[in-house]
Amino acid sequence: MTPLVRPATLDDAPALSRLAASTFRETFAHENTPEDMARYVAEAFTPERQAAELTDPAGTVLVAESSADMGAAGAELVGYVHLVAGPAPAAVQGPAPLELKRLYVARAWHGQGVAQALMDAALDAARARGARSLWLGVWERNPRAVAFYAKYGFARVGEHTFRLGDDAQTDWLLARPLD
């Protein structure tokens, strides 16, 4: 079953906080120290931080939910994507760039079309915002994500440093035009 993808609302902040923290841990805990993970999650995924991101006019957050009654109160969030307008790194040369800041899906929903539904919705949302290119940073040690983005036409254009707690990690910068 492909979940419903919809714009996130302020009411989603608590559930989005839990989903963001759990998917980040599912994806990266096995490659990082518990201390670095705890520090990053405690800063990046609080309900207050999610509420701030949901009300930021520069951002667009879409959520995927699954329930017998899609859109009903109590539906389970199973994935999300966060787009952000702002300056792009110098390596990103595309016109009118928009950042794909995060795209995560709960592990139990991997392989069920959720990531594809979120990416398709993100591409549509980026175009609707007037973006002509999309860029993102992906950890060089996340081959699943690198392969997923390659399927969507993203190509490596550079790299930058991402801090996870005390650990400086290399993220590859990927970009693609929006035709």
Image (tube, helix red, strand yellow):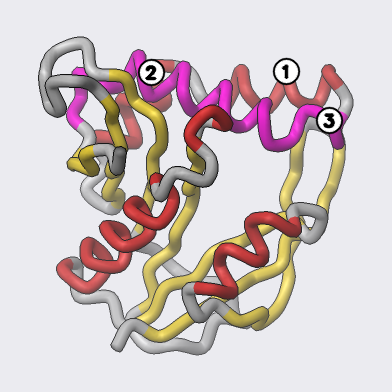
Quadrant containing the C terminus is: bottom left
Q: Tell me the amino acid under the disc marked 3.
A: His
Q: Which residues lie in the magenta part? A: 9-32
Q: Is residue 38 above or below residue 107?
A: above
Q: CA distance from mark 3 to mark 2?
A: 27 Å
Residue 65: quarter of image: top left
Horizontally, is 93 left or right of 144 in the view?
Answer: left
Give the residue at mark 3.
Answer: 30
| Element assignment for label 1 | helix
Residue 173: quarter of image: bottom right
Give the residue at mark 1.
Answer: 38
| Element assignment for label 3 | helix
Q: Position of residue 56 (x, y in %)?
A: 27, 41
Q: Main secondary structure of the magenta part?
A: helix
Q: Position of residue 178 (x, y in %)?
A: 33, 82
Q: Position of residue 171 (x, y in %)?
A: 73, 60
Q: Of callouts 3 and 1, which one flags the residue occurring earlier in the amino acid sequence?
A: 3
Q: Of callouts 3 and 2, which one flags the residue occurring earlier in the amino acid sequence?
A: 3
Q: Tell me the amino acid under the disc marked 2.
A: Glu
Q: Reply yes or no: does residue 25 show up in magenta.
A: yes
